[in-house]
Image: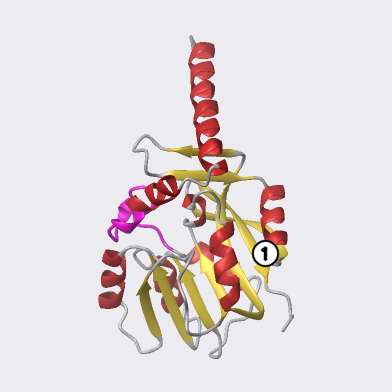
Amino acid sequence: MDYKWHYECNLVLELSERIIMIEDNYCNQDTKDRSKQRWRKSEPGRGLTWGKIISGNHFIKKMQSYINFDSQKKILEIGPGYGRLLKSFLEMKIPFKKYVGLDISQKNVDFLKSTFQDESIEFMNGDTENFVFSEKFDIVCSSLTFKHLFPSFENALRSIIKYINPGGIIFFDLLEGKKRIFEEDHLTYLHSYTREEVIEILRKISLDLVSFDQVKHTSGFVRLLVVAKNPNIF
């Protein structure tokens, strides 16, 4: 019985992956839009992080192990959600010159603006893949977001790199593996990546891999952390 159940699960997974590969190959705009529907309508809260509010401390501490923060650094966060990373920055008294958060959900942005009121902090509503910033950043971070980008995070990074200063560092986490599926709601897209896939995407958009690492968000939720650098090329 167990064998049959595993066989059927693997068959469903294989069929799901084949469907997504077909959609990917045809670059189906409807599918791309569908993958963003949930996040455009999302609200700040535990629904964004496995049904419970979690701290951003583990992610921020990992960032600290690679860079020195100071009062001249400009930071961009992609997908701030309910502000867990920024809250950790502030609680840990990590200095920065400016902190900008870009979120695809207007409800998230409204919540963040009302929660974090400081002239050095700014939140904007927009899509990472086509948003135009008026400034450049020294540090870019994104947590629990890139795994949902269809068909991959490549287009988002290709857009973001234009706004990373030479020598700037980007941190983002991913599901590690080799799987692409839409969940039962047909809206939530999940993409797991092998390290080889990540390296190839970074190479295509001229970002240098600094390191692969791991970040433990909470018990049972460990993610692959990617640390990459914009080369010192003007």
Residue 156 vertical position relative to residue 122 in the rendered view, above or below: above
Which residue type does callout 1 highlight? Ile
Q: Is the magenta stretch mostly helix, strand or loop?
A: loop
Residue name at image x 55 percent, y 72 percent: 140
Along the viewing direction, whichever of 200 and 51 lies nearer the viewer: 200
> Which residue lies at the image location 39% right of the left edge and 53% below the top edge?
36
Circle 1 is placed at which residue position?
205
- The location of residue 137, given as percent across then percent down, is 55, 81
Q: Where is residue 231 in the image (x, y as percent from the top left)?
A: 73, 75
Q: Which of 160 and 22 is in front in this view?
A: 22
Q: Where is residue 72 in the image (x, y as percent from the top left)?
A: 55, 90
Near-viewer residue (64 or 144): 144
Q: What range is drawn magenta here?
A: 39-55
91 in magenta: no
Tag count: 1
How far across and how far down the image is residue 195, in percent?
A: 69, 49
Q: Which residue is drawn at 38% across and 81% down?
A: 122
**Label 1 element class:** loop
